[in-house]
Image (cartoon, rainbow, N blue to C red):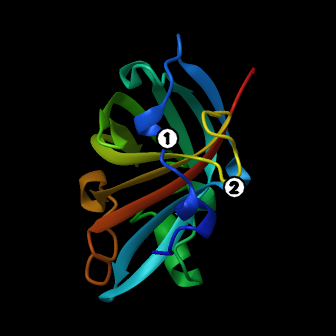
């Protein structure tokens, strides 16, 4: 997987010093600056892919993360598998079957603070199969933003899933079952 941009590495984690707020705040995803990345093994070697976000509803309650909500839909039709033949196989009938299942959806069901980050538990639907998925989250203030400014944030989410759990089992002799997720989402507060 690619290393994080230098700006993100230099950002200061704000989770441990967030001021309290009265209610969840709505955030818009800056899709052109965000990336849903994934890694997998093809013939034993590492491969990277990506998938754009089609829509997102994000509300964060900094005083009580359990009141936060996340609902994200990915555009499977625009998924990339790293190289042309991998992209075609990824979108094909035996893996994601884009003609029948053009979207992947993740809806958070529980968000809890953990150290300087959070655990986002939810339900992911791939190929019409819904299963639980837990992601580790880190929240960063954008480089150059003043301390306490929560208007523009970068969220790093990491986790993994087994593609066979979703009947995305094509090419099992050359593609491994584990899919590592690395999502960089840039968000901006709405209405303030």
Q: Residues within 10 Å of mark 1 (few under 14, many from 20)?
A: some
- Secondary structure of residue under mark 1: loop
Residue nearest the observer in this picture, 178 or 11: 11
Q: Give percent across and percent down for residue 45.
A: 35, 88
Is residue 56 found left or right of 62 in the rendered image? right
Q: Residue at x 56, y 83 (%)?
A: 83
Task: Say which mark, if any, is on residue 49.
Answer: none
Residue nearest the observer in this picture, 163 or 8: 8
- Secondary structure of residue under mark 2: helix
Q: Residue at x 45, y 24 (%)?
A: 68
Q: Give percent across and percent down for residue 91.
A: 52, 65
Residue 93, above or below 64:
below
- N-terminal label among 2 and 1: 1
Q: Give percent across and percent down for residue 58.
A: 56, 30
Q: Which residue is mark 2?
A: 33
Task: Say which mark, if any, is on residue 14.
Answer: 1
Q: Quadrant of residue 114?
A: top left
Q: Residue at x 37, y 43 (%)?
A: 117
Residue 151, above or below 64:
below
């Amino acid at each position: 997987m690619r290393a994080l941009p230098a700006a993100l590495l230099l950002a200061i984690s704000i989770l441990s010093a967030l001021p309290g707020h009265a209610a969840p705040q709505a955030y818009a995803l800056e899709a052109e600056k965000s990336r849903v990345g994934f890694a997998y093994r093809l013939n034993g070697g590492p491969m990277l892919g990506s998938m754009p976000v089609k829509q997102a509803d994000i509300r964060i309650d900094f005083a009580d993360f359990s009141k936060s909500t996340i609902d994200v839909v990915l555009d499977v039709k625009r998924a990339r598998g790293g190289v042309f033949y991998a992209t075609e196989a990824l979108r094909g009938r035996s893996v994601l079957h884009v003609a029948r299942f053009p979207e992947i959806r993740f809806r958070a069901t529980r968000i809890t603070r953990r150290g300087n980050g959070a655990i986002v538990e939810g339900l992911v639907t791939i190929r019409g199969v819904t299963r639980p998925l837990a992601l580790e989250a880190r929240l960063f203030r954008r480089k150059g933003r003043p301390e306490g400014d929560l208007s523009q944030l970068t969220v790093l989410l990491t986790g993994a899933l087994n593609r066979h759990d979703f009947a995305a089992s094509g090419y099992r002799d050359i593609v491994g079952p584990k899919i590592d997720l690395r999502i960089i989402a840039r968000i901006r507060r709405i209405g303030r």
